[in-house]
Amino acid sequence: MACLVFESGRRPGLAAIKACSAGTGAFTVSHADDAASGWIEVLRDGLTFDLVGLSPGGPADLPSMPHRFNLPATTPDPPGEAVIIALGPHLAGSERLMPVIRTVAGLAAALSGLDGIRAVGWLPSKSLSSANWFESAITAWLDGGPFPSLALAAFYRNRIGNLCSTGLSFAGGQDFELASADPDLAADDGRLAMRLADWLVANGPAEAAKTIEFPGCGALRVEPGPGGLLSASRV
């Protein structure tokens, strides 16, 4: 579900993961008999996850991650060597449950301070963000803040200039296309998109056309379209 991307040759091993566990108190190492292969099991909030790609084994396969946020323009592609956070076998099929998403995100945030880390990725949205920013956004969310849509989802412009989301449907919300007909309003698209993303994750997919008011930000008319994609436009 998530990945940690490190500079070449700087992926952590078991000792570094244990030191992170001791320093943060955010998780424990629950199984490490095969650590030399690059795999260990960790425990957080009663749930177990696999870390795959640790040193001295080889890096994990990193899929294409086209969406980038708060990363230097000089970040290479591929951006580095990956360690993957995967669900333990007992969680198979539960990856879309919000308690699981929150736990995985919290684990990735706890690991984001490891030496040599370049970025943290969220695989459902194929997005990468800087480690410091990811940790800050996830911590604020877990403390009761808004859904971290730039960490656990992504926004991009389609060929006609509308702002589209990806990854929200994985988190129980709904992906959308926000019309941007007025170039003078384009600067506000991001703010409206993040408010809509937070609303959709909190309330679930909109099943019928409706107008949603966002105090201090305006209103959007939303309407489900083909394939469940939500069309959104300013009122």
Image (cartoon, rainbow, N blue to C red):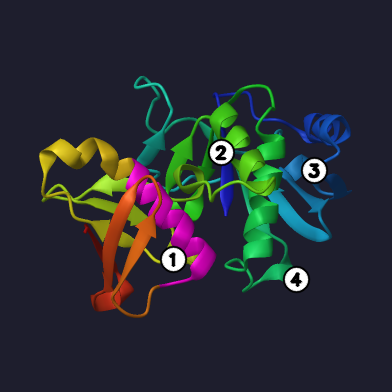
220 vs 169, nearest the viewer:
220
Q: Earlier in the sequence, mark 1 or mark 4?
A: 4
- Determine whether, in the image, residue 25 is placed left or right of residue 71: right
Numbered range of the magenta stretch: 191-205
Rendered view: 172 above or below 126? below
The kind of residue on which mark 3 rests is: Ala
In the rendered structure, are the residues bearing label 1 and label 4 in contact, judged by CB atoms less than 8 Å apart? no
- Determine whether, in the image, residue 126 is placed left or right of residue 35: left
> Which of pointers 1 and 2 indicates the residue nearer the eye?
1
Real-space CA distance between mark 4 and mark 2, rounded to the nearest whole angstrom = 24 Å
Q: Position of residue 142 (x, y in %)?
A: 67, 48
Q: Is disc 3 placed on a helix, strand or loop?
A: helix
The N terminus, quarter of image: bottom right
Real-space CA distance between mark 2 and mark 3, rounded to the nearest whole angstrom = 16 Å
Q: Earlier in the sequence, mark 2 or mark 3?
A: 3
**Disc on res. 97:** none
The residue that mark 1 highlights is 169
The residue that mark 3 highlights is 35
The residue that mark 4 highlights is 90
The kind of residue on which mark 4 rests is: His
189 vs 60, nearest the viewer:
189
Q: Position of residue 73 (x, y in %)?
A: 34, 22
Pointer 3 local density, CA inside 10 Å: few below 14, some 14–19, many at least 20: many
Real-space CA distance between mark 3 and mark 4, rounded to the nearest whole angstrom = 20 Å
Q: Residue furthest front?
A: 215
**Disc on res. 82:** 2
Rendered view: 97 above or below 163? below
Real-space CA distance between mark 1 and mark 4, rounded to the nearest whole angstrom = 23 Å
Question: For residue 89, what is the image quadrant?
Answer: bottom right
